[in-house]
Amino acid sequence: MKDAARLLLYLLAVLLCGALLAPLLFWPGRELITRGWFPGLAHFEFESYFHRALLLAALLLLAPLLRSLRVRTRTDLALEKNPLAGADLAAGFSIAAVPLLCGGLALIACEIYSLRHPFLWGKMPGVLAAALAVPILEELLFRGLILGVLLRNCSRWNAVLMVSALFSVIHFLKPPRLTTPNESVTWFSGFLSLGHSFWQFGDLPLVVASFFTLFVVGCILADARILTRSLWLSIGLHSGWIFADGLFSKIAHRETFALPWIGKDLLVGIVPLTIALASWALMRCWLNYAGARSQSVSRTR
């Protein structure tokens, strides 16, 4: 279990370094605003810098982690070249996005959500950027690196359960907005944001609903990665969920809070959980179809 211990140390180091880096990113950003350069940075609060500091720390510490784990090629992580990469990516996106958007339409029909007037189309570039960048980064880290390392020493399902639980917990580490006002940022502000990141755990119904939905989503993504021995299908699924949830939030808003059926967005509650399970079944059907088609093509050659 030495590899697992190294992964744990890496995650703790990312949190520590991210907390230290956050003020070092924030202060130069405020200086640029004062000088009249990059005025768009004025819209970002300290918590935004904190999130980006965590990402930067994760990238900076990745190379030492890979050396310590003796990871040199993708085969060291049980990954292979996928001849159906494009098809898996497109299929995963559709399998995730279409059922979730259909569920959103059903919620509008039930008057749990209502259409916005006007629609927030001006915020769609941010949704597209998130649907492109977040799945790649998170799949490389969770399903690519962490799951690949755990598969060395654990059974398949133990590895899937552990990485899915970690994936779910990490998504709760979000401090509430304006935890640290911009005017009072100090060297310790990153650690304060880190402490406030656990604020959501105080709302037990929300934690239970969110955790299990994210946990199941993590299991689906891990299953896709293991069955294809690549990340393309899981990236497509992840991108589809983010895109559908982001698109729906810009065209509709919640009228009522109906836990445990539906929470703060389309990714929380029993209804999203049911839709995710349906997408899991569709994913398995796609893999059966793609596998049969691949074998048929191979025989004709």
Image (cartoon, rainbow, N blue to C red):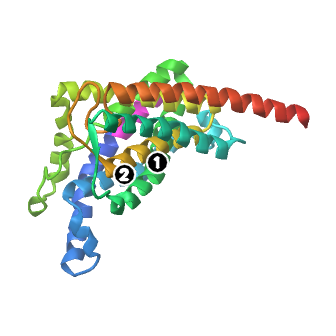
Q: Position of residue 153 (x, y in %)?
A: 53, 22
User: What numbered label is drawn on residue 55?
Assistant: 2
Give SS at disc 1: helix
What residue does disc 1 label? 137
4 within the magenta span: yes
Whether residues under marks 1 and 2 lie with C-beta atoms below 8 angstroms apart, the answer is yes
Residue 203 left/right relative to 105: left
Q: Nearer the viewer, mark 1 or mark 2?
A: 1
Q: Position of residue 138 (x, y in %)?
A: 45, 43
User: What numbered label is drawn on residue 66?
Assistant: none
Q: Quick one: 20 or 193, which is closer to the camera?
A: 193
Q: Please give the range of residues in magenta.
A: 1-11
| The quadrant where residue 230 appears | top right
Q: Please indicate, yes or no, whether residue 150 appears anywhere in the rendered image.
A: no
Give SS at disc 2: helix
| The quadrant where residue 244 appears | top left
User: Badge 2 local density, few (<14 within 10 Å), some, or many (20+)?
Assistant: some
Direction right: furthest residue = 301
Vertical comparison of 232 with 259: above or below: below
User: Badge 1 local density, few (<14 within 10 Å), some, or many (20+)?
Assistant: some
Residue type pointed to by label 1? Leu
Q: Please indicate, yes or no, whether residue 3 appears anywhere in the rendered image.
A: yes
